[in-house]
Amino acid sequence: MKALGVRLRGLRTEAGLTGAVLAQRAGVGQPTVSKVENGRMVPSLDVLGRLSVALDLDEPTSREVRDLLAAVEAAPGAVPLSGEEVPAGTVLDEAVRSARLVRSFQCVVLPAMLQSAEYARHVFASAPYSTPEAVGRAVAARVERQSLLYEPGRESVFVLTEGVLRTWPGGPSLMLAQFDRLLAVESLSTVRLGVIPWRRAVPVMPRHGFTLCDRRAVVVEAFRGERVVEDSDEVAAYEETFRRFEGAAVFGREARELLVRVMREFQELEDSTTH
């Protein structure tokens, strides 16, 4: 932690910035910059990324500070990542912003770009070290970012297992609103939404969700946060895995029929709980 803090302080000094100016540019609190530089706080990957961008670090230096953070996380008795600024999930949102082609596979939770505001609230609130204020900001940012789905020139392909549709937070009414959104998004010319029915065997046993951003990076999602992978061989391996999941999914009319069928089951569940 001290080595990471000293390195970041040195980079800030080299850039000729005060802690206050760096905090403003990075969109974090000044106390966060101070605590990180003094080795009293472990930044989340998102906060470290914001600081790196604000410091205008080149790729080798950015990789160096990420490696220092990874060493902190791997150390025995490591301090949990700080959730003071943003909860898990925002690294993915930022990566998607700059991509023209987004391909996402999910086996537990709905893709970030398809989540309703209330569904996203449950996702962010369940992340470790989240706070109500941070969750509110993250939900607002995610909903705003979903406007990218409508931009000409962008392409989004989502593949999810049927189990995702049946893994739900909140109540049935939340999921009914969520299915309305899925059906609306599925009709967009810029979006392909596929579902792997539970009656069909998966080509690969899924272990986690992931999102490919163009052909340059993949965001691998875990319980405590996201990991951005830019190694070309690893990105290519994820592309091949995505193609296999995509080949097992149903799209178009079959996907819509499946969505409507599961939606009706939620409606029946909602009716049974209100009578």
Image: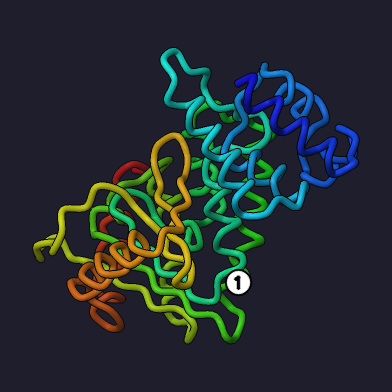
Give the residue displayed 67% in from the left and 16% down from the top: 40
- To which quarter of the image does residue 130 belong? top right
Q: Is residue 269 visible?
A: no
The quadrant the C terminus occupies is top left
Q: Residues within 10 Å of mark 1 (few under 14, many from 20)?
A: some
- The residue identified by callout 1 is 148
Measured from the top left, where is residue 229 in percent x and y? 44, 54
Give the residue displayed 66% in from the left and 61% down from the top: 144
Number of marks drawn: 1
Q: Is residue 18 visible?
A: yes
Give the amino acid type for the residue marked by disc 1 in the picture: Leu
Could you tell whether 25 is left or right of 70 in the image?
A: right
Above-or-below relation of 185 to 205: below
Give the residue displayed 45% in from the left and 78% down from the top: 191
The quadrant the N terminus occupies is top right
- To which quarter of the image does residue 66 belong? top right
In this orientation, which residue lies closer to the viewer: 256 or 231? Answer: 231
In this orientation, which residue lies closer to the viewer: 31 or 196? Answer: 31
Above-or-below relation of 273 to 41: below
Give the residue displayed 48% in from the left and 79% down from the top: 155
Could you tell whether 52 is left or right of 174 in the image?
A: right
Above-or-below relation of 104 to 164: below
In this orientation, which residue lies closer to the viewer: 108 or 208? Answer: 208
Find numbered disc 1 in the image and state the secondary structure of the residue it sits on. helix
Measured from the top left, where is residue 223 in percent x and y? 40, 36
Could you tell whether 88 is left or right of 245 in the image?
A: right
